Image (cartoon, helix red, strand yellow):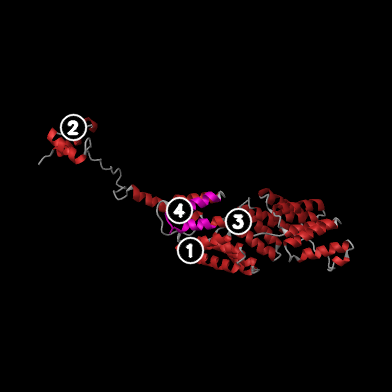
């Protein structure tokens, strides 16, 4: 039976433009209009919304906007998780590495923004974004890893470890979280736990260079340089574009007193990353060990130009000036090292030694006292203070009679 609604639909299919037709209630005769009003309410339109047009055979009806959004979010989440890798390397993760678990589409943008803010060192905003990602999906491992990285950058290592623990609990195959937790343990000088975490990260993703570099650092910190060297070699082979393992391997050569090979590797680290202040400082120290103080000072200058808050570089440059008998410049550099790091006991001892060389024993003793106050186990400062008292003729306060202990000819850093 032909109804008024069906007739109206047929007219819609041939009328163009469709707005020329009246609405269905206006089209109906009075009796049918009353029935329609009871069903739809006064003034309600009964026109059906047109179905979406499938504009391409490659986009079947199942590829709804919601499904496409989920696919995009998964793709972004992989990138976001990768971006949370600690800054100890620029390596690209193996595609087989588990990245995340238990996601929902809305978490990825928050996690990704957290990574961006973290790279900019805007830690408060980074934490806010990671918190929101976790609120939307508490089973998403990546933002916990991101929060761990933030806390590590803020030197809150215990909270960083707690966040990495949660990321690992949610995703036991998360190589980045093991590497990050290893970094935090290493910062706490808990080298055995650090080595265990780096080893697990390597097991999960053998192509990931950062834990090789980190484990090398941990072995070197324990004095096991023979085990450190293969890890640096492997890190370099996996990622030749990372400056860090070249610097680490150079440190091993430095420890072995093979300064020429150390200088070559420091140079390679600088070639890969010309803004890597640590490599300039360390190469300067290698030159100083070869008594090439002018080249050493040039490298320290570059390190300080890149990082004006680098206390060790100030102290090392002071040592180079001291070796050149330029005591005033040495004292100025030691003072800058203290300004940057007021708890830097070595700088107080070194400045005290420079004052003693100028025969200003009262100032020397004051600096040795401060070095001892900061580090009561600092034997060199005790010995130097004893010799300063002896040079003043105050033998009762100078129980030790050994020769003054000169500055340690600099320090290199990882």
Q: Is residue 350 left or right of residue 208?
A: right
Q: Which one is earlier in the sequence, the residue at label 4 or at label 3?
A: 4
Residue 142 in the figure: left or right of residue 310: left
Identify the residue position indicated by label 3 in the image. Answer: 243
Residue wearing tag 4:
133
Q: Position of residue 282 (x, y in %)?
A: 68, 57
Where residue 362 sits: x, y (%)?
A: 84, 57
Magenta range: 123-148
Q: Earlier in the sequence, mark 2 or mark 4?
A: 2
Q: Is residue 128 magenta?
A: yes
Which residue in the protein does label 1 denote?
168
Identify whether 375 is placed above or below 75. below
Dots 2 and 4: beta carbons under 8 Å? no
Q: Nearer the viewer, residue 175 or 26?
A: 26
Q: Position of residue 189 (x, y in %)?
A: 62, 65
Q: Compare residues 166 and 216 and report the one nearer the observer.
A: 166
Q: Which residue position is annotated with label 2?
A: 26
């Amino acid at each position: 039976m032909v109804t008024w609604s069906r007739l109206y639909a047929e007219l819609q299919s041939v009328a163009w433009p469709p707005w020329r037709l009246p609405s269905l209630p206006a089209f109906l005769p009075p009796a049918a209009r009353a029935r329609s009003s009871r069903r739809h309410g006064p003034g309600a339109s009964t026109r059906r919304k047109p179905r979406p047009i499938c504009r391409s055979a490659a986009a079947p009806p199942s590829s709804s906007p919601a499904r496409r959004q989920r696919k995009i979010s998964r793709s972004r989440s992989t990138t976001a998780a990768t971006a949370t890798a600690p800054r100890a390397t620029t390596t690209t993760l193996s595609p087989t590495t588990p990245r995340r678990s238990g996601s929902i589409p809305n978490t990825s943008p928050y996690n990704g923004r957290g990574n961006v803010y973290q790279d900019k060192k805007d830690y408060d905003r980074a934490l806010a974004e990671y918190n929101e990602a976790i609120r939307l999906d508490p089973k998403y491992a990546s933002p916990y890893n991101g929060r761990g990285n933030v806390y590590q950058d803020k030197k809150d290592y215990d909270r960083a470890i707690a966040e990495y623990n949660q990321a690992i609990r949610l995703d036991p195959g998360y190589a980045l979280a093991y590497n990050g937790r290893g970094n935090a343990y290493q910062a706490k000088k808990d080298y055995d736990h650090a080595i265990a975490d780096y080893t697990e990260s390597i097991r999960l993703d053998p192509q990931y260079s950062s834990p090789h570099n980190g484990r090398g650092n941990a072995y070197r910190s324990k004095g096991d340089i023979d085990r450190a060297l293969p890890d640096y070699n492997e890190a370099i082979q996996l990622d030749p574009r990372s400056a860090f393992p070249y610097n680490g391997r150079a440190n091993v050569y430095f420890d072995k007193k093979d300064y020429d090979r150390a200088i070559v590797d420091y140079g390679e680290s600088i070639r890969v990353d010309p803004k890597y202040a640590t490599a300039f400082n360390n190469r300067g120290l290698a030159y100083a060990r070869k008594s090439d103080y002018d080249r050493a000072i040039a490298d320290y200058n570059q390190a300080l130009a890149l990082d004006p808050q680098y206390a060790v570089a100030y102290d090392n440059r002071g040592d180079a000036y001291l070796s050149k008998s330029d005591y005033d410049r040495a004292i100025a550099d030691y003072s800058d090292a203290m300004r940057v790091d007021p708890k830097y006991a070595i700088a107080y001892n070194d400045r005290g030694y420079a004052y003693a060389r100028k025969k200003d024993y009262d100032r020397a003793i004051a600096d040795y006292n401060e070095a001892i106050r900061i580090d009561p186990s600092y034997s060199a400062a005790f010995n130097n203070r004893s010799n300063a008292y002896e040079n003043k003729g105050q033998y009762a306060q100078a129980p030790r009679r050994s020769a003054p202990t000169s500055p340690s000819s600099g320090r290199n850093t990882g």
